[in-house]
Image (cartoon, rainbow, N blue to C red):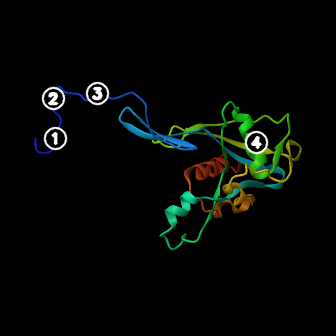
């Protein structure tokens, strides 16, 4: 037994609760804290617009280098550069969650919400145990008088320039191929809450 166990009775390792910055980038940091290493990023809103009068939802056809990297050696997805995702956006310093939702709808889908439309956020979910960022989710049921459409503004990033928003008819939802957990979660929630 001693051959496999390094634990000695009566001795405990003390956890170091001092925060150590292991890496600092433009949009994220890697932190060491209490014997864990994790990514520290800003919170994000995740928005699923439901255009009720048209029986459509809006998703992103998004250029995602992360998924491209993962699939680079998979024959079925080797040449795929765009994936269906939710509309998402990082909450900027001092910005309210509602304002982030409104800004992202405009930037990514060209949806300008009416000033009287109330944005109701649903869940606040951590991305993973290895990340401090939380997803703030909402499904927006929109009727014609709740919004107007304009050209999406974008945020000036390459990712936004290479991506677009697409309308998906409700009859096509079961045929969609998702690649990330938050997109699958939001679509499942939408089906359960709106398509009973």
Q: Which residue position holds label 2?
A: 9
Mark 3 crowd level (few <14, some 14–19, many ≥20, 10 Å Cα): few
Helix, strand or loop at label 1? It is loop
Question: What is the CA distance from the residue labelled 4 to the residue labelled 1?
Answer: 55 Å
- The answer, for residue 120, to whether it is visible in the render is no
Q: Nearer the viewer, mark 4 or mark 2?
A: 4
Residue at figure coordinates x 89%, y 43% from the top left: 145
Mark 4 crowd level (few <14, some 14–19, many ≥20, 10 Å Cα): many
Q: Is residue 174 left or right of residue 11?
A: right
Question: What is the CA distance from the residue labelled 2 to the residue labelled 3?
Answer: 15 Å
Mark 2 crowd level (few <14, some 14–19, many ≥20, 10 Å Cα): few
Where residue 62 appears, as percent x and y from the top left, is 66, 58
Q: Which residue position holds label 4?
A: 103
Question: What is the CA distance from the residue labelled 4 to the residue labelled 3?
Answer: 45 Å
Q: Which residue position holds label 1?
A: 5
- Give 124 or 143, whichever is nearer the viewer: 124
Q: Nearer the viewer, mark 2 or mark 3?
A: 3
Residue 77 is drawn in which quadrant?
bottom right
Mark 1 crowd level (few <14, some 14–19, many ≥20, 10 Å Cα): few
Question: What is the CA distance from the residue labelled 4 to the residue labelled 2?
Answer: 57 Å
- Give 160 or 143, whichever is nearer the viewer: 160
Question: What is the CA distance from the residue labelled 1 to the residue labelled 2?
Answer: 11 Å
Where residue 76 appears, as percent x and y from the top left, is 53, 72
Helix, strand or loop at label 4? It is helix
Q: Is residue 4 left or right of residue 194?
A: left
Q: Earlier in the sequence, mark 2 or mark 3?
A: 2
Residue at figure coordinates x 84%, y 54% from the top left: 151
Q: Which mark is residue 14?
A: 3
Q: Earlier in the sequence, mark 3 or mark 1?
A: 1
Where residue 133 appears, as percent x and y from the top left, is 55, 39
Residue 83 is drawn in which quadrant?
bottom right
């Amino acid at each position: 037994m001693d051959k496999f166990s390094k634990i000695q009775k009566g001795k405990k390792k003390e956890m170091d609760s001092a925060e150590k910055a292991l890496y600092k980038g433009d949009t994220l940091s890697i932190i060491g804290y209490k014997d864990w290493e994790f990514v520290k990023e800003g919170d994000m809103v995740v928005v699923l617009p439901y255009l009720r009068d048209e029986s459509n939802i809006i998703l992103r056809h998004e250029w995602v280098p992360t998924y491209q990297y993962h699939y680079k050696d998979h024959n079925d997805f080797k040449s795929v550069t765009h994936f269906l995702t939710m509309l998402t956006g990082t909450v900027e310093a001092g910005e309210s969650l509602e304002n982030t939702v409104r800004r992202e709808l405009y930037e990514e889908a060209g949806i300008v919400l009416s000033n009287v439309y109330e944005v109701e956020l649903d869940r606040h979910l951590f991305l993973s145990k290895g990340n401090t960022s939380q997803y703030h989710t909402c499904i927006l049921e929109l009727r014609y008088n709740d919004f107007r459409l304009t050209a999406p503004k974008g945020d000036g990033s390459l990712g936004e320039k290479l991506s677009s928003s697409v309308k998906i008819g409700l009859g096509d939802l079961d045929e969609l191929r998702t690649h990330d957990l938050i997109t699958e979660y939001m679509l499942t929630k939408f089906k359960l809450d709106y398509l009973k």
